[in-house]
Image (spheres, rainbow, N blue to C red):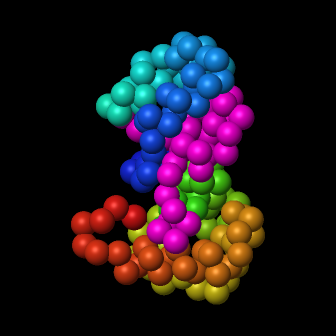
Amino acid sequence: MSRRVLRGFSADRLADLRIEAGLTRGELARLAGVSLGAVQSWETGRAMPQVDSLAKVAAVLDVPINRLVLIEPGKRHLGDLRVLAGLTQPQLAARISLSTTSLSSVELGQTGLTDDVAGRLAKALNLPVRTVVDAYERTRTRPPNTPA
């Protein structure tokens, strides 16, 4: 399970989409396989979901994750691309045959992004290589104390 801060998660959007779907918090929790307390905490902003739980909720609501995680395309970091694909670090690392530690280091901008890894990430995330490289550059050049 990823421990990354979920940049751009909108508690209000989650509540709005749940209500639009005609679901109670309890029904959403049951259908997504998460606890009622988790849904309550997410909707009130007391906690943020992990990406794997968010992917389950998005599937129940029949919406893409980018309806719940609001980050403009030109401001997305490398880890955001993974989150928007609904993948945890271990899941993505396995798909691209990279250790989770190495993927984490790349997502934080602490390790260089090789052409090979950029290509594998792009393929796994179903994105153009340029999108991956640009997101990595935003991650690497972000100001100090800014979440990746």
**Which residue reaches farthest bottom?**
115
Q: Is residue 25 left or right of residue 87?
A: left
Q: Is residue 67 above or below residue 104?
A: above
Q: Quadrant of the C terminus?
A: bottom left
Q: Is residue 103 visible?
A: no
Which span is picked out in magenta? 47-76
Q: Is residue 72 above or below residue 129?
A: above
Q: Choose between 118 and 23: the one closer to the eye.
A: 23
Seen at 66% across and 70% down, the residue is 121
Horizontal and vertical percent position of residue 104: 47, 64
Horizontal and vertical percent position of residue 27: 60, 14
Seen at 50% across and 37% down, the residue is 13
Q: Is residue 138 visible?
A: yes
Quarter of the image where one finds residue 93: bottom right
Q: How many marks?
A: 0
Is 111 one of the magenta-colored residues?
no
Horizontal and vertical percent position of residue 114: 59, 85
Is 67 one of the magenta-colored residues?
yes
Q: Choose between 99 and 80: the one closer to the eye.
A: 80
Q: Is residue 9 left or right of residue 87?
A: left
Seen at 58% across and 58% down, the residue is 82
Seen at 64% across and 81% down, the residue is 130
Horizontal and vertical percent position of residue 17: 58, 31
Q: Is residue 25 above or below residue 72?
A: above
